[in-house]
Image (cartoon, rainbow, N blue to C red):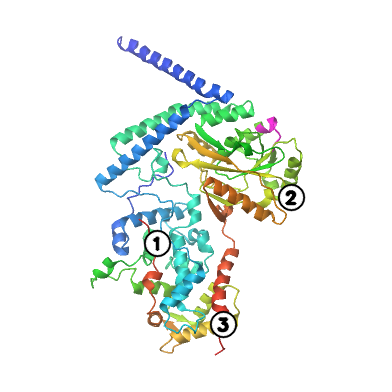
Amino acid sequence: MGSRSSHAAVIPDGDSIRRETGFSQASLLRLHHRFRALDRNKKGYLSRMDLQQIGALAVNPLGDRIIESFFPDGQRVDFPGFVRVLAHFRPVEDEDTETQDPKKPEPLNSRRNKLHYAFQLYDLDRDGKISRHEMLQVLRLMVGVQVTEEQLENIADRTVQEADEDGDGAVSFVEFTKSLEKMDVEQKMSIRILK
Amino acid sequence: MFLLLPFDSLIVNLLGISLTVLFTLLLVFIIVPAIFGVSFGIRKLYMKSLLKIFAWATLRMERGAKEKNHQLYKPYTNGIIAKDPTSLEEEIKEIRRSGSSKALDNTPEFELSDIFYFCRKGMETIMDDEVTKRFSAEELESWNLLSRTNYNFQYISLRLTVLWGLGVLIRYCFLLPLRFKEFMSKHVHLMCYRICVRALTAIITYHDRENRPRNGGICVANHTSPIDVIILASDGYYAMVGQVHGGLMGVIQRAMVKACPHVWFERSEVKDRHLVAKRLTEHVQDKSKLPILIFPEGTCINNTSVMMFKKGSFEIGATVYPVAIKYDPQFGDAFWNSSKYGMVTYLLRMMTSWAIVCSVWYLPPMTREADEDAVQFANRVKSAIARQGGLVDLLWDGGLKREKVKDTFKEEQQKLYSKMIVGNHKDRSRS
């Protein structure tokens, strides 16, 4: 009879997703609702187009890079994949740091994983290094046409030089982490879901 | 077999009598007052009792869910994430300050950490953005016994099921046929509209009726559903402007044109803005003609916000009478998502809702001032309507539902950011 005959509690693999991402049941429900709102044609997965339709994302200078991060392989992202990316932005709670079971994999919202997410946004070809050329391209995305090529090159050169320690002309993940060691990453890369 | 017959005829008789009584009652209570514009307080009572039933139903559902220890999905109208309203500059400066080990006088132009800001903002919009929310039907915090608005439909106890079943029965068997019959007949405009209003069990509260649009003006209102037309037209005479629709709407439109001078356009003509403007101006300048009713948004929004008004109607230079329409979503969702439902499906949904409750505010007339252009005037009117109706004033174009956003907004962000990193460059000496 209704147009929404969905059943909220039945998220496929709900338990394993919860364990993997650390989201609460309530948060997962909200995200599932959001996933379905974005999936306009009810395909069961999201395509790049679905995310591009979000107006506020389209005006974000790094919108395309963010969208790209949801599609590590292929053209579709299903709900577990969607939540896995969002899990990086889960705020760090005390319970996460207490139960440090060495056998369990690192939680997705650890400091290291948050930094790795940001690193990926810079690393266009996913080779594990940010080259000067990649830095230039991402900078160009952020400033548009407002800055000249020369100015931008100077900035890119300076940034890579400062962070590069082994002198290979590129910034590896370790060097990236080191240059941001004083940054309160946990707070700046966290989004709190309301209860 | 002999025993059955008398019973049968008894039942049939009873049914017949009760039906006749019912119809007569309804006739007396609905049609006659509609003609004379008189109202009995019955509908108000109906509304009050409905509210009580909904509240009880929601409570029952929550209790049931707690017993079974299931999670209830509670829709959240203010957004699902916590957001701080800081600007680009402030946030990036803060990020730099918290991570920078450099001395403060050596202000850096660009930091690797700047990306965090855009990253987080982007992720926030993926989790929750204003516009996608506007275009899905407004979520209700209590269940109104229409299974379409309820996400937790499976958690109902037996009593609730019975009540819901009864509700369905009433709605589909009694209210629907009656409304359908009434909806199809049209004689005189005002009377017809009034009957429709009663038929949909619409309870409309008009505010500030002294500001009602006069001849030679343009009436501008926010648009949620085709019912807006019925609601406004039942309280005054208007000339309609709109596209010629096919199907059921087309038939109705043609009937209306015979009674009153309206201005209808073909779809192709609509694209020609000059033609539209010319015809509207002609109509407006003739003082004897009725005020034109226009919905400048161009598409149906789900009645929680007022999207950007297209400026065409504001260029004409006539007096604009803004009207704000707000529906109470508890009694039936009036939103029409034209990319999802067709007209007939929508009408069916409308007629099988409990009631349509809405408020109409007539705002004082506005004219375009000498120093503002059409766009600014349109925005002013839009803000006035949004403020009155308690709707959220949004910058986004209603056309967002079908198209992507223009690049100008992105450029603004880029400009802001560039100023941050290049503005400082001039102070530094080249290395």
Q: What distance separates the C-alpha of mark 3 from that of mark 1? A: 39 Å
Q: Which mark is residue B274?
A: 2
- Say which chain tag 2 marks: B
Question: How many C-alpha atoms fall within 10 Å of the one at disc 1: few (<14), some, or many (≥20)?
Answer: some
* B261 falls in the magenta region: yes
Ranked by sequence position, the earlier of labels 3 and 2 is: 2
Disc 2, SS: helix
Q: Left or right: where does residue B67 sit relative to residue B7?
A: left
User: At label 3, which amino acid type do we have?
Assistant: His
Give the spatial CA distance, label 2 vs label 1: 47 Å
Magenta stretch in the rendered image: B256-262
Residue B425, label in figure: 3
State the residue position of label 1. Answer: A82
Q: Position of residue B211 (x, y in %)?
A: 63, 39
**Residue type at tag 1:** Phe
- For the image, the number of numbered tags is 3
Cα separation between marks 3 and 2: 49 Å
Q: Which chain is disc 1 placed on?
A: A
| Quarter-of-image position of residue A72 | bottom left
Label 1, secondary structure: give it: helix
Please say whether residue B91 is one of the residues in the magenta stretch.
no
A89 and B238: which is toward the camera: B238
Q: Residue B307's spot in the image, x, y percent? A: 57, 52
Give the x, y percent position of residue A11. Answer: 34, 53
- The answer to whether B407 is drawn above or below residue B181 in the figure is below
Q: In this view of the protein, which residue sits in the foreground, B50 or A49?
A: B50
Looking at the picture, tell me which residue is in the foreground, B214 or A126. Answer: B214
Front: mark 3 or 1:
3
Q: Is residue A124 visible?
A: no
| Residue pictured at 45% horizontal, 61% vertical | B126
Q: Secondary structure at mark 3?
A: helix
Between B378 and B283, the one lying in front of the other is: B378
